[in-house]
């Protein structure tokens, strides 16, 4: 919920199936519910909330993959090209299970479980 719903159209237009959580579940759903939905439905969580990476590390699970952005300006207009580039570079890892961290200058991928 911390990322704009405007991300979904940008990702969809560039070949990445995406939907904002507000279309799926309650705005105040706990992070654990979002993670379980993503795991059950084979989706990747895209977030600005570092709690998802922490949940993933503590769970020691191999899914769902999580993409976390670590920048101040998380608008699709600003960060879109960087995120799209990282998705193209690390798509295979995300399909297998990974934590992808993206900032304005680099991306880092950790294979799950961590």
Image (cartoon, rainbow, N blue to C red):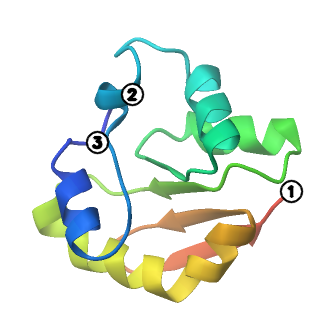
Quadrant of the rendering where the C terminus is positioned? bottom right
Q: Which mark is residue 85?
A: none
Q: Residue at x 62, y 42 (%)?
A: 41
Residue 91's spot in the image, x, y percent? 56, 78
Q: Secondary structure at mark 2?
A: helix
Q: Nearer the viewer, mark 3 or mark 2?
A: 2
Q: Is residue 73 above or below residue 55?
A: below
Mark 1 lies on residue? 113
Task: Tell me which numbered mark, 3 or 2, is placed earlier along the sequence.
Answer: 3
Q: Residue at x 75, y 50 (%)?
A: 63
The image quadrant that residue 62 belongs to is: bottom right
C-alpha span from label 1 to label 2: 26 Å
C-alpha span from label 3 to label 1: 25 Å
Q: Secondary structure at mark 1?
A: loop
Q: Residue at x 68, y 49 (%)?
A: 64
Mark 3 lies on residue? 3
* Badge 3: residue crowd in 10 Å (few <14, some 14–19, many ≥20): some
Q: Nearer the viewer, residue 86 or 72?
A: 86
Q: Are marks 3 and 2 in contact (CB under 8 Å)?
A: no
Q: Nearer the viewer, mark 1 or mark 2?
A: 2
Mark 2 lies on residue? 24
Q: Is residue 97 above or below residue 42?
A: below
Task: Tell me which numbered mark, 3 or 1, is placed earlier along the sequence.
Answer: 3
Residue found at the very far left of the displayed protein: 77
Residue 98's spot in the image, x, y percent? 70, 64
**Can residue 74 be seen by looking at this rendering?**
no
Q: Is residue 90 above or below residue 2?
A: below
Task: Tell me which numbered mark, 1 or 2, is placed earlier along the sequence.
Answer: 2
In the image, taking residue 72 as reference, residue 77 lies left or right, namely left
């Amino acid at each position: 919920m911390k990322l704009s719903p405007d991300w979904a159209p940008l990702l969809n237009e560039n070949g990445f199936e995406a939907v904002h959580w507000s279309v799926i579940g309650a705005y105040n759903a706990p992070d654990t519910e979002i993670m379980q939905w993503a795991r059950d439905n084979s989706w990747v969580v895209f977030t600005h909330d570092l709690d998802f990476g922490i949940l993933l590390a503590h769970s020691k699970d191999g899914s769902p993959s999580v993409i976390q952005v670590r920048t101040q300006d998380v608008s699709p207009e600003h960060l879109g090209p960087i995120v799209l580039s990282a998705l193209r570079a690390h798509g295979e890892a995300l399909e297998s299970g990974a934590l992808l961290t993206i900032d304005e200058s680099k991306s880092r991928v950790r294979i799950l479980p961590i």
